[in-house]
Every structure is written in C-alpha cells, then in structure tokens.
Amino acid sequence: MPSSALLLLNRPSASAQPHRVGAPDLTQFDPHDPVLSALDLAATRGDGIFETIGVGQGAPQALEHHLRRFGESARLLELPTPDAAAWRAAITTAIAAIDPVDEASVKIVLSRGVEGDDRPTGWAFASASPDHSAARRDGISVVTLDRGYRHDVETTSPWLLAGAKTLSYAVNRAVMREAARRDADDVIFVSSDGYVLEGPTSTVVYRQGDRILTPGPRLGILDGTTQSNIFRYAAQQGLQTGIAQPSAADLTAADAVWLASSVRLAAPVNRLDRLDLAVDRELTAGMNDFLLAVRE
Ligand code: PLP
C-alpha cells in the first residue's frame, strides 16, 4: 500500500453536473500524475476551498465539524454546495487506500473548476503525517504579526472572505517565512486595531487561571475543530471554557498559550515575541492524548 493516495470526485456537488456521465463516483490516481487542468481556477486564481482532516489510527477526526466548515466556506465563496455524502466517501476511501499509520491526514479541495466549465473540481489526498511530538511536548516559539485588517472585517467587508478556508494561502505561507527570519516557528495574527486573531494554520487557545479561552467569533477567523475538542477536554477536567477578545498583551500575561490545529494538535507556545512563556506540560499532554484518541 502507498503512503499517500489521491482520489478525484466525479460529482463534488449535487447541484453541478458530473465530470463524466456514468463514471464511478471516485477515481484513484497516483499522486504524482498530472491530474489537475492548468486552466483550473484552483491553479490560476486560488479560487476554491479546502479542509485538512486529522486521522488517528485510521479514523477521521472531527469529520462532521470539518464538513460543516467546508460547506460554510463554499457558501462564503458562492461555490456549489459540497455533497457531504460524496465527500465522506472520498475521505474514508482515501484513508483506506494508504498504509495504516498512527497519524495521517486527508486534505480535501473544492475549486470552482475550469473557467467557464461550470463544474467544480474536487479531490481528496491522504498522506501519513510528519512527527509533531517535539512541538507538542517542548512547544514552539511564536511572533505576532499584523494581519492588516480591523477585527470586524468579516462584518464590514465580507468580500474579503475572512473566516473562509480558501485556497489563497500564499499570505499564510509568507508569514511563516517572516517568522523564520525572526527566529520563530509560527505566527499569531493580530488585527490592525490590536486584537489577537488566529495563526496562519491554527487557532489560539490560552489559559487564565481555571479558564480556557479562545478568540472569536465574528473576528474573521476560522471556527477551529481542534479548539472545539480542546474545550471538550477542558470541560472534562473541570476547567471553564469561553470566548474572549484578547490583545497581544493579554496573551503574554496568560498562564499558558497553545496553537491548536488538526495535524499538529495542541502546540504549547514557549516564547511569544521574545518573551518566555510557561509551558503547562501536564495539561498539554492530557490535551494531546485526548485529541489523538478523539473521533468526533
Ligand atoms: N485557522 C486557520 C487560518 C487555519 O488554516 C486552521 C487550520 O488549518 C485553523 C485555524 C485550525 O483549524 P483546525 O483545528 O480545524 O485544523
């Protein structure tokens, strides 16, 4: 069995025509084969959406939450509504097509398709995950960077698609290079008016006493599936959970800070803007054990 698998959906949305009438719902390709048209709007404009779903011991994690968010991103971009059943099948088939490993992920992509064709393109790519145990255990060093928008951009300028998981991630990659220039591993975006938003591929979670908090909603950020499961774990531990609107100074004053995401899971922040932060090793290990085992 291969360590990665690529599946193309014949009909990613029930409201659009299939690519080939009578063809199977899913076709598997070698991930190195040229499958995508150079005219696809995913390639030419970044006009599409995606999700990355963690897979623990062969089971997709937070699948329904990811599919809900996928549908919400499609709505924001006015893409044809993804057919949830077709995507569920693509995800499980992709997972079954790779070597069994402890941790893997499936990336699902829906693009507007070839310009003028009126049929979205959709694919699922499963692969084994890299080893994130050092980041989970020892933590990561993070810098805050200005995202350049006010915290209320989602309401004032919905056409900027803040809060949609679009394929236009060049900025999210550029900030990682900026982080490396500043000797850091990752980034927390701050709004132009000073509020903490999210990481380029993660949600901010922090502890203040016995409360576990996260920024949002309506800050133009993603509704994190990992953060949501961290809150479930925290509640089991008798901690309170809640939504807040912290400034960068509130984060440096917090008792602990994490960046939460589907594949790396809970990475404690050990340094924020050159200030050392305490890592709560016990709570972090508990969170990650929970996240590794979680199915919903
Ligand atoms: N925020 C952004 C911008 C992301 O890209 C991601 C995930 O890639 C997240 C937050 C975390 O979401 P999740 O925990 O569902 O992976």
Image (tube, rainbow, N blue to C red):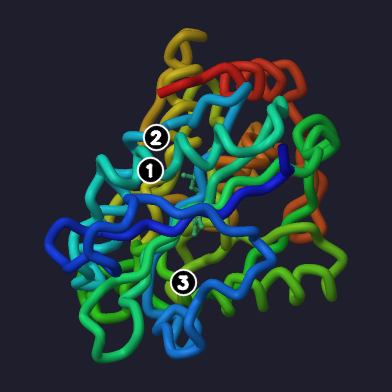
Question: Tag on residue 63?
Answer: 2
CB under 8 Å between discs 3 and 2 = no
**Left of 256 or right of it: where is 261?**
left
Amino acid type shown at disc 2: Leu
The mark total stands at 3
Quadrant of the rendering where the C terminus is positioned = top left
Give residue 224's quadrant in the image: top left
User: Residue drawn 71% across and 59% down?
Assistant: 186
Identify residue for label 1: 66
Real-space Cα distance between discs 3 and 1? 15 Å
**Left of 267 or right of it: where is 5?**
left
Real-space Cα distance between discs 1 and 2? 5 Å
Give residue 66's quadrant in the image: top left
- Up/down of 233 relative to 118, above or below: above
Q: Is mark 1 within 8 Å of ligand 1?
A: yes
Amino acid type shown at disc 3: Leu
- Up/down of 188 relative to 253, above or below: below
Residue 180 lies, in percent from the top left, at 82, 69
Identify residue for label 3: 167
